[in-house]
Image (cartoon, grey):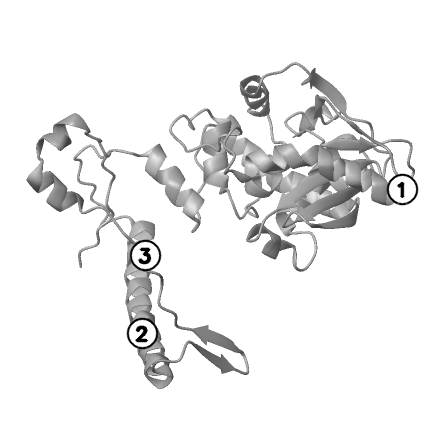
C-alpha cells in the first residue's frame, strides 16, 4: 500500500499550528502528539542520542524527571545550534544563490492515516525546482566526526521524514563543522526508504497509542530511561525460575560478563606490555596507529574529608542531598 501511494503525486503538508508566537513549552506539548523529523531516527532505533524507550517516555508524558537540555545554557550544543542556525542559512544562500524563508508552523502529513507524522522545517527554499527544504546543522569537535562520511544516518532519517510529510522531492542539508567549515549535501526523496520509515514509525507510534513500553536496547539512553521509569524498588521478590525467556536472558548475561572479564584481563595484559616497552617515552608509533602515555598536569583539590573533620558544623550549614539510585547486582 505504501509503495502504491509513493507512485502517486505527493500532496502538500497541512499546517497544523503556527509557531510564530508559541513558547517553547507550548511547542514541546504539540510535539507530543506525533513523531517529528528530529524524532524519526529515535523512533526507528537509529539515533545516537536517544533510544526508542526514552522517546516513548517523552511522547507518553513520563519524562518529567528526565534530564533536558537548557536552551539558554551557553555551554549547551542546543544553545549554539539555535544561535547559529540563521547564520548557517544566510551563508547557504550566499554560497548557492538560493532564497530561503522560515517556516513558522508545525506541519502534518495530509493523509489522515499518518496524522501522527509531524514536521518542523528549519527553512523552505523559495521558488526552486531542484530543492525545496533546507535543514541547518552545526557540529563541534566531537559531533563533526559523525559527518566524516557524509550525512549521518540519523539526519538522513530526519530529512526523509520531512520530505514524506511535505511531499517535497529534495532537501539540502547545510552543516557548519567546528565553527569554520560549511558543507552542503543534497538529499533526494527516496520513496522506498520513506515507505520503510513510515512502517517503523507506525510500529513505534502503536506503542505510544497503547501506552506500552518499548523493549529496552543497549544504549545509555535506555539505561537512563529505565532508571527514571523505575526509580524505586518495592521490596518484592520476583520468582522467575519458571520464566524460560527470563532465565535464558539471565544465562546469557552471566556468559557475557564472563567474556567481558576475560577480555578486560587480555586488554590489561596487552596494555601493560606496551607500557613496559615504552618506558619513559611519551608516544609510540605503529603502522595502524599511535599510543601516547603522558603525565597530566598537577591539580589542586579541596580535602573535604579533612575540612569536615576540622569543622564538622559546615555539613549542617551547606548540606547537599544526593538521591539514591537502584543498583543492579548479580549473584551466582
Residue 215: numbered disc: none
How many numbered circles are shown?
Answer: 3
Residue 130: numbered disc: 1
Query: Gap between marks 2 and 3, in whole Å?
Result: 30 Å
Decide if residue 151 is on the left or right side of residue 234: right
Q: Which of pointers 2 and 1 lies earlier in the amino acid sequence?
A: 1
Q: Nearer the viewer, mark 2 or mark 1?
A: 2
The answer to whether any part of residue 216 appears in the image is no
Q: Which of pointers 3 and 1 lies earlier in the amino acid sequence?
A: 1
Q: Which of pointers 2 and 3 lies earlier in the amino acid sequence?
A: 3
The answer to whether any part of residue 206 appears in the image is yes
Q: Is residue 134 above or below residue 120?
A: below
Query: Gap between marks 3 and 1, in whole Å?
Result: 54 Å
Q: Nearer the viewer, mark 3 or mark 1?
A: 1
| Residue depicted at 36% across the width and 39% down the height | 226
Residue 268: numbered disc: 2
Local crowd size for mark 1, using a 10 Å CA cut-off: few (<14), some (14–19), many (≥20): some
Provide the secondary structure element on which disc 1 rests.
Answer: loop
Residue 248: numbered disc: 3
| Residue depicted at 68% across the width and 29% down the height | 120
In depth, the one of 213 and 313 nearer the eye is 313
Q: Nearer the viewer, mark 2 or mark 3?
A: 2
Amino acid at each position: 500500500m505504501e509503495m502504491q501511494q509513493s507512485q502517486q503525486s505527493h500532496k502538500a503538508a497541512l499546517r497544523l499550528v503556527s509557531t510564530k508566537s508559541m513558547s517553547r513549552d507550548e511547542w514541546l506539548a504539540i510535539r507530543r502528539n506525533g513523531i517529528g523529523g528530529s524524532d524519526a531516527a529515535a523512533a526507528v532505533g537509529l539515533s545516537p542520542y536517544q533510544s526508542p524507550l526514552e522517546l516513548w517516555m517523552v511522547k507518553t508524558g513520563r519524562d518529567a524527571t528526565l534530564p533536558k537540555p537548557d536552551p539558554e545554557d551557553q555551554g549547551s550544543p542546543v544553545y549554539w545550534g539555535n544561535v547559529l542556525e540563521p547564520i548557517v542559512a544566510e551563508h547557504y544562500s550566499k554560497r548557492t544563490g538560493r532564497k530561503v524563508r522560515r517556516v513558522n508552523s508545525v506541519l502534518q502529513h495530509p493523509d489522515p492515516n499518518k496524522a501522527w507524522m509531524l514536521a518542523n522545517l528549519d527553512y523552505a527554499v523559495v521558488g526552486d525546482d531542484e530543492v525545496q527544504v533546507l535543514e541547518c546543522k552545526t557540529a563541534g569537535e566531537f559531533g563533526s566526526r559523525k559527518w566524516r562520511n557524509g550525512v549521518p544516518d540519523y539526519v538522513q532519517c530526519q530529512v526523509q521524514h520531512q520530505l514524506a510529510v511535505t511531499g517535497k522531492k529534495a532537501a539540502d542539508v547545510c552543516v557548519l563543522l567546528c565553527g569554520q567549515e560549511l558543507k552542503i549535501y543534497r538529499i533526494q526523496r527516496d520513496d522506498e526508504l520513506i515507505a520503510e520509515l513510515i512502517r517503523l514509525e507506525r510500529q513505534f507510534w502503536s506503542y505510544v497509542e497503547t501506552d506500552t513500553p518499548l523493549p529496552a536496547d543497549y544504549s545509555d539512553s535506555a539505561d537512563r530511561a529505565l532508571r527514571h521509569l523505575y526509580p524505586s524498588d518495592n521490596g518484592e521478590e520476583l520468582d522467575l525460575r519458571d520464566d524460560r525467556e527470563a532465565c535464558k536472558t539471565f544465562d546469557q548475561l552471566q556468559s557475557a560478563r564472563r567474556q567481558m572479564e576475560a577480555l578486560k584481563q587480555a586488554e590489561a595484559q596487552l596494555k601493560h606490555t606496551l607500557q613496559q616497552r615504552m618506558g619513559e617515552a611519551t608516544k609510540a608509533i605503529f603502522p595502524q596507529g599511535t599510543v601516547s602515555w603522558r603525565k597530566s598536569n598537577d591539580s589542586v583539590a579541596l580535602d573535604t574529608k579533612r575540612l569536615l573533620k576540622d569543622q564538622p558544623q559546615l555539613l549542617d550549614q551547606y548540606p547537599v542531598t544526593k538521591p539514591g539510585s537502584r543498583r543492579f547486582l548479580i549473584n551466582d
